[in-house]
Amino acid sequence: MASTGNLAGRRDAVHDRGAGQTVSVASAADAEVSDEDMLLFQQLFKQHIGLHLPLSKKALLQSRLSHRLHELGLCGLAQYHRLISAADGAEERQRAIDLITTNETYFFREPSHFDFLTQELLPQWRDHKSLRVWSAASATGEEAYSLAMLLDHHRPPGSWSVFASDISTRVLRFARRALYPMARGENIPRLYLRRYCLLGTGEYEGHFLVQAGLRAKVEFARRNLTALHEHEDGLYDLIFLRNVIIYFDCDTKLQVLRDVIARLRPGGYLVVGHSESLHGMELDLLMHSPSIYRRPQ
């Protein structure tokens, strides 16, 4: 990632000619988010990634972007919005997307979904020669590697694949590196820890690294869930789309779900987060249990 130099420590002053005052960059960047600024970012994130950012998320917008405003020496969110909306602002716009969409997760989150895979799906699919699994909002990779550990343990070599995607290029770089704080691995079964994780030492103390052989079996790529038509990724037997559709408005949520389901094999399963509901939506799915759905044959 390119260095921004020592901009974070700057306390430049910007002269506001209209008001005849001098405004500190630091205080302007930390100012409360106005409704007008929030509307600008709502429209931008909706346009580019389908993200619904309600007014109640003002504090999140401020906390995620304020440090970047300091780094760039900008005097407020409106100025930053002009920068990332410009024709040549794609790189910085992606950085803003990374900052807004990144959420911390951990291995084997919502363990009942992994129990379902182990206890029901894998026995049911025992005779399938190959299984394709998609972690459709993989963030920093914990979900994808959790799936890979489970599949590698239970399936013959070469009989499965995991594809993992996210909108954020920054988290994808983190995922490919596969170096994690120990706290994120607390739910990893002891057998998998011994087999697939290397304990960090020296400067990496307090971290673990996913074993290289397993890393090589997981493919990471950037995908925008609101623009899946741009890619031909084939069909999957199992899709994890967890804890992401809650960030879309109703119309976008329906569009994303239909596009994702179109990539699910007949008889395949879609798994969403425990806090997410598909109730009342017209979708080509049958509910197996809360948060687990099957596409009819």
Image (spheres, helix red, strand yellow):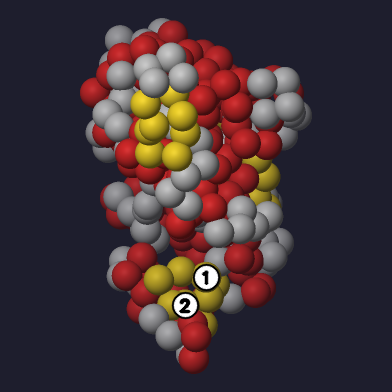
Residue 213 drawn at (x, y percent): 66, 73
Q: Is residue 85 above or below residue 159?
A: above
Judge left or right: residue 130 versus residue 8: right
Q: Earlier in the sequence, mark 2 or mark 1?
A: 1
As drawn, the residue found furthest toward the bottom would be 202
- Depth check: 258 or 116 in front? 258
- Depth check: 152 or 11 in front? 11
Q: Which mark is residue 179?
A: 1
Residue 187 drawn at (x, y percent): 31, 66
Cβ atoms under marks 2 and 1 closer than 8 Å: yes
Q: On the rendered image, what quadrant is the N terminus found in? A: bottom right
Residue at x-position 69% and y-position 65%: 216
Residue type at mark 1 is Leu
Residue 262 seen in this snapshot: no
- Depth check: 176 or 82 in front? 82
Judge left or right: residue 265 versus residue 243: right
Q: Which mark is residue 208?
A: 2
Residues at marks 2 and 1, CA–CA distance in whole angstroms: 6 Å
Residue 175 drawn at (x, y percent): 56, 58
Element assignment for label 2: strand
Q: Which mark is residue 259?
A: none
Residue at x-position 52% and y-position 18%: 44
Residue type at mark 2 is Phe
Q: Local crowd at mark 1 within 10 Å, few (<14), some, or many (≥20)?
A: many
Residue at x-position 46% and y-position 69%: 180
Residue 181 drawn at (x, y percent): 40, 71
Q: On the rendered image, what quadrant is the C terminus found in? A: top right
